[in-house]
Image (cartoon, helix red, strand yellow):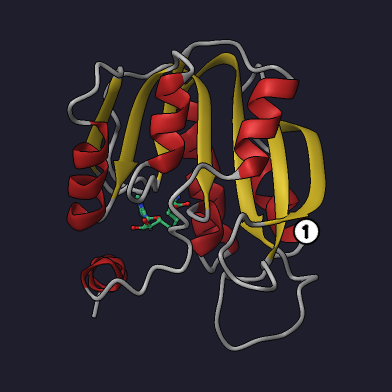
Amino acid sequence: MSKHNRWEERYKIENTPWDVGKPDFNLTSIVTKRPIGVCKALEIGCGTGDNAVWLAHRNFIVTGSDVSDIAIQKAIEKASNTDLKCAFVVADFLKDEISGAPFGFIFDRGCFHSFDSDKERKRFAENVASHLEKGGLWLSIIGSADDLPRDHGPPRRTARDIVVAVEPCFVILSLHSSHFDSNRPRPPKAWVCLMQKRNRA
Ligand SMILES: C[S@@+](CC[C@H](N)C(=O)[O-])C[C@H]1O[C@@H](n2cnc3c(N)ncnc32)[C@H](O)[C@@H]1O
């Protein structure tokens, strides 16, 4: 089964432990406390849309994109019957250009970390940079290798994995250890990385 079909299958059989039914506190706290000003925002790998819808409620003009049709259908349903400025598109971020660029803010929770090789993660970071305006921000929530070894749950990436992929195109503004918002008794550890596009990227 291709990687894309595996994501679709997980939404089909509802094996989606990451889908906690609310926006992740790491996103809400950084957007509100930094604060990140209202702008055009893109969520990559938005799943069923809770983070994108939260941003739209805060007046961001949001595009949510995901490779899974089922996830995007659910996200569209969530945003329907509201007057939120929130569009959802099915797209493969490693291949497709998302319309609406340049964005001022890009967010992903668990999408960047899903790529296993340095090469793919570097390509992902380059594509984020090409969708951002000058000085634009990228916030990524990434499974952490400092979590205990386990045979399920999010991928476990090291700080090195992140730095190698993002540094050519991004200045790292902050990288801190946190955990995913989760319905599990022991939430998986996460890196929360806020980056700014380099002038030359
Ligand atoms: C761990 S899930 C997280 C979903 C959502 N961000 C959330 O927090 O609920 C990763 C998401 O990335 C999407 N994804 C994986 N590869 C992708 C790609 N190449 N382009 C766009 N989305 C992708 C999957 O379909 C899935 O919805």
Residue 175 found in image quarter = top right
User: Which residue has dot 1 on it?
Assistant: 160
Residue 187 shows up from this direction: yes
The quadrant of the image that shows the N terminus is: bottom left
Q: Residues within 10 Å of mark 1 (few under 14, many from 20)?
A: few
Residue at the (78%, 57%) spot, across then down: 159
Q: Is residue 194 left or right of residue 5?
A: right
Residue at the (64%, 42%) spot, across then down: 25
Residue toward you, 158 or 51: 51
In the rendered image of this protein, does residue 69 appear above or below residue 201?
below
The quadrant of the image that shows the C terminus is: top right
Q: Is residue 31 left or right of residue 15?
A: right
Q: Is residue 121 left or right of residue 10?
A: right
Residue at the (39%, 48%) spot, across then down: 45
Residue 41 shows up from this direction: no
The residue under label 1 is which amino acid type? Answer: Arg
Label 1 C-beta lies within 8 Å of the nearest ligand 1 atom: no
In the rendered image of this protein, does residue 13 appear above or below residue 59?
below
Q: How far from the left and from the top, in percent, is residue 109?
A: 53, 49
